[in-house]
Image (spheres, helix red, strand yellow):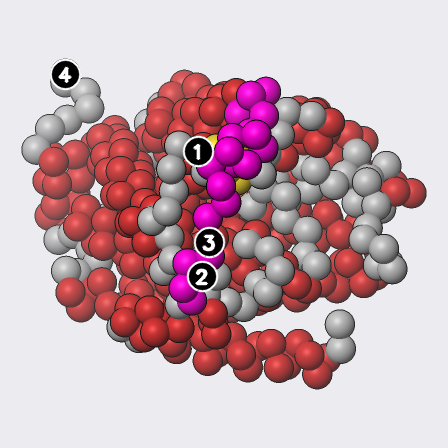
């Protein structure tokens, strides 16, 4: 890819971002007419029952990652007085995004956007128009594909809430995440996964299950949110240790189990590709856990449970974009490298710059996603046990494409997220009052407590 084409692409991105933040009607004018539906008989004959069964299972596994996996993971990391607030945010954010997804999100992510198709889809699938039980997406029913991708759209904004937990208004979380998926998640998902004509897809970037779409997106939005919402009252002075590492360990374990649906399900079939993604999800995570424990033991003299579960998430994040492209040994190395990078992020970068990322969303998801995306370009090489590159593509070329896709995602997400946080602050306010924060969001925002003495 020439520097001229990249500059042109970034210029086009700026135009598209401005259009995205215009009224929805402006996008509707660019949408194309719905493509003719395939005959029901042809759709039925294309559907494979084995693939369908696996994708139904994978979809439920990804939901299990969010509820209760992510909710318990984050819940254990906050103080006891904020436990229910995090559970509520994960539950309600997911529910709101499910509705948004079927109303217009699926259409923006996976339909043709006409003149804006390089950046976002159109409205031909608005309200799931034209989708029937007989519609096929590859070898599975389209409803199953819609449901699977819906769980990705739900977990990504749910990941963000860990960055500003314990001090944000509940209404602000809901409004921000609804806006954020519309102007950040859906366009990036379209650009990476929707096929020919979409910007990052046409670049040839490798993102098997969401290194850019999910983790870099969530990490960058979390970092921007942590800075714009501000530090927790008493941060750096009061004790703010996780209130239950037991719950965090349980949540992390659920995340690991659910991640097999996340990664292996992204093969969209029950075959060798799913098998490769599955074993890589085992090996990368194991490599990351061991690496984090060794690093922490060397640096602090003890390996902690918090460090071990951080290694779990770092490994899972890093292998997400690489799961279908690298070999099992390469996945171990990738997980270990990502673990080291994330350890540096949460123990050095965070302290150096002084931002309050409650659950280290940027330190683990953002940094781990960046390492995973770049590492995919390296470890996909057949000489390193990977599946190899597209015809005519070298390792250097693939790594360059991965780098450009990472930079593009960071800029797109960072700029638009900052604008959306500001809008939400003006409309409903981002932070709860200091008194409510000191009381705890469980009581002040929801009128109930997780624990009773």
SS class of the residue under badge 1? Answer: loop
State which quarter of the image contains the N terminus.
Answer: bottom right
* Distance (Cα) linking label 3 and label 4: 62 Å
- Check residue 176 in the rendering and tell me which mark sits there, or answer none: none
Residue at point 35%, 27% (across, down): 67
Q: Nearer the viewer, residue 308 or 385?
A: 385
Q: Nearer the viewer, mark 1 or mark 2?
A: 1
Q: Is 390 positioned to the left or the right of 347 in the image?
A: right
Range covered by the magenta-colored residues: 32-52
Residue pointed to by mark 1: 134
User: Compared to 41, does 129 lie above or below?
Assistant: below
Nearer to us: label 4 or label 2? 2
In the rendered structure, the answer to whether residue 126 lies left or right of residue 44 reads left
Q: Which residue is mark 3?
A: 36
Residue beneath label 2, please? 121
Observer able to see residue 379: no
Residue 161 figure quarter: top left
Return the residue at label 4: 453
Separation (CA) of disc 1 from disc 4: 55 Å
Q: How crowded is the residue under tag 2: few (<14 C-alpha within 10 Å), some, or many (20+)?
A: many
Residue in front for this viewpoint, 325 or 413: 325
Counting residues from the start of the chain, the first of labels 4 and 2 encountered is 2
Residue 358 found in image quarter:
top left
């Amino acid at each position: 890819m020439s520097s001229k084409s990249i500059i042109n692409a970034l210029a086009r991105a700026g135009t598209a971002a401005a259009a995205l933040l215009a009224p929805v009607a402006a996008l509707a004018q660019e949408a194309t007419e719905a493509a003719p539906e395939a005959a029901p008989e042809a759709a039925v004959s294309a559907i494979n029952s084995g693939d369908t069964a696996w994708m139904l299972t994978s979809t439920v596994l990804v939901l299990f990652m969010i509820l209760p996996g992510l909710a318990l993971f984050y819940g254990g990391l906050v103080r006891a007085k904020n436990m229910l607030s995090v559970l509520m945010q994960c539950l309600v954010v997911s529910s709101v995004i499910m509705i948004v997804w079927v109303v217009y999100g699926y259409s923006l992510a996976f339909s043709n956007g006409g003149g804006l198709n390089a950046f976002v889809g159109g409205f031909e699938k608005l309200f799931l128009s034209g989708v029937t039980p007989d519609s096929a997406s590859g070898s599975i029913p389209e409803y199953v594909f819609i449901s699977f991708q819906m769980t990705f759209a739900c977990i990504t904004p749910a990941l963000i809430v860990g960055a500003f937990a314990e001090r944000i208004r509940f209404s602000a979380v809901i409004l921000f995440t609804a806006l954020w998926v519309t102007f950040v998640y859906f366009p990036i998902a379209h650009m990476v996964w929707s096929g020919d004509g979409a910007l990052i897809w046409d670049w040839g970037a490798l993102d098997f299950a969401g290194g850019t779409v999910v983790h870099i997106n969530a990490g960058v939005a979390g970092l921007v949110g942590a800075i714009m919402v501000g530090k927790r009252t008493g941060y750096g002075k009061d004790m703010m240790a996780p209130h239950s590492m037991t719950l965090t360990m349980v949540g992390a374990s659920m995340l690991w189990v659910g991640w097999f649906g996340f990664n292996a399900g992204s093969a969209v079939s029950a075959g060798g590709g799913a098998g490769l993604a599955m074993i890589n999800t085992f090996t990368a995570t194991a490599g990351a856990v061991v690496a984090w424990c060794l690093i922490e033991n060397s640096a602090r003299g003890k390996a902690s449970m918090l460090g071990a579960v951080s290694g779990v998430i770092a490994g899972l994040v890093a292998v997400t974009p690489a799961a279908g492209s690298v070999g099992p040994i390469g996945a171990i190395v990738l997980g270990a490298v990502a673990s080291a990078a994330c350890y540096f992020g949460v123990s050095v970068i965070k302290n150096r710059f002084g931002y309050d990322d409650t659950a280290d969303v940027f330190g683990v998801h953002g940094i781990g996603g960046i390492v995973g995306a770049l590492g995919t370009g390296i470890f996909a090489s057949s000489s390193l046990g990977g599946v190899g590159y597209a015809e005519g593509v070298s390792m250097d070329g693939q790594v360059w494409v991965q780098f450009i896709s990472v930079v593009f995602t960071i800029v797109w997400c960072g700029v638009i997220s900052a604008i959306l946080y500001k809008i939400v602050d003006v409309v409903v306010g981002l932070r709860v009052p200091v008194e409510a924060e000191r009381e705890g969001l469980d009581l002040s925002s929801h009128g109930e407590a997780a624990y009773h003495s």
